[in-house]
Amino acid sequence: MADRILIIEDEEKIARYIELELSHEGYEVAKRGDGCEGLEEAQRGGYDLILLDIMLPGLNGLEVLRRLRKTSGIPVILLTARDAVMDKVSGLDLGADDYITKPFAIEELLARIRLAMRHKEQTKPSDELTAGALSVFPAKREVRYGSDLIELSAKEFDLLHKLVMNKNIVMSRDTLLNEIWGYDYFGETNVVDVYIRHLRSKLDDVYGVTIISTVRSVGYVIKD
Ligand code: CA
């Protein structure tokens, strides 16, 4: 399957030029000309890399990056203006993988894209837990079903991570409660069941499959 690249760039001529060149190289390309729409599209998932302009209408590129990094570790290459040193520094601090200064030679952009993607491939094995189509990336606190990014709260993520880490092993409610909410948790005792319901509403119900199985009067298990 072709790698998918999202271009977020408001200068139509530049966006169109990059799109043509990348398509020619065999990439699947989508583009958005507005920061808000770009962020929305990026969060929808399914992309392998994002080319992100900084000066954008709606939401500037650095803010798009900052919000995106809360849920996604996707490679991002910033498209920056020649003299925007602070933008580059802020961008890298915010988690951009690389930047390229406009105007650039397309060969340089292609090389940087390959490099960013190769780096992602190399960091994959140690950083990915899977159960069926479900992938958990603990370092990025990211969960995917297939290529879809699943948005979870912190506790939902912790619970799912624990279940996937112990896949095929039945986890009792007590174990999950102690390990995720702590021994000193004095809230509702059915909190585990409540969060399992949240997870199912975002996974099992959406995809019409059983990801989290209930083991009656014991607890829960995710089977591979
Ligand atoms: Ca711009």
Image (cartoon, rainbow, N blue to C red):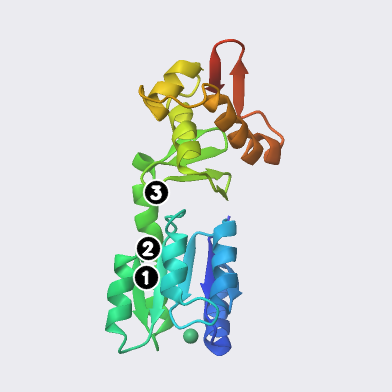
114 on left or right of 223: left
Q: Please report whichever mark, 3 or 1, sits nearer to the chain's N-terminal start.
A: 1
Q: Give the x, y percent position of residue 176.
A: 45, 23
Q: Secondary structure at mark 3?
A: loop
Mark in front: 3 vs 1: 3
Instruction: Say which amino acid is labelled 2.
Output: Ala
Residue 116 is labelled as 2
Mark in front: 2 vs 3: 3
Which quadrant of the rendered structure holds the N terminus?
Answer: bottom right
What is the crowding at mark 1: few (fewer than 14 residues within 10 Å), some, or many (at least 20)? some
144 on left or right of 106: right
Q: Quadrant of residue 55?
A: bottom left
Q: Give the x, y percent position of residue 39.
A: 54, 67
Instruction: Say which amino acid is labelled 3.
Output: Lys
Question: Which residue is at a point 50% across and 81% down the rendered structure image?
Answer: 56
What residue is disc 3 on? 140
Distance (Cα) linking label 3 and label 1: 22 Å
**Foreground of the two, 148 or 162:** 162
Distance (Cα) linking label 2 and label 3: 16 Å
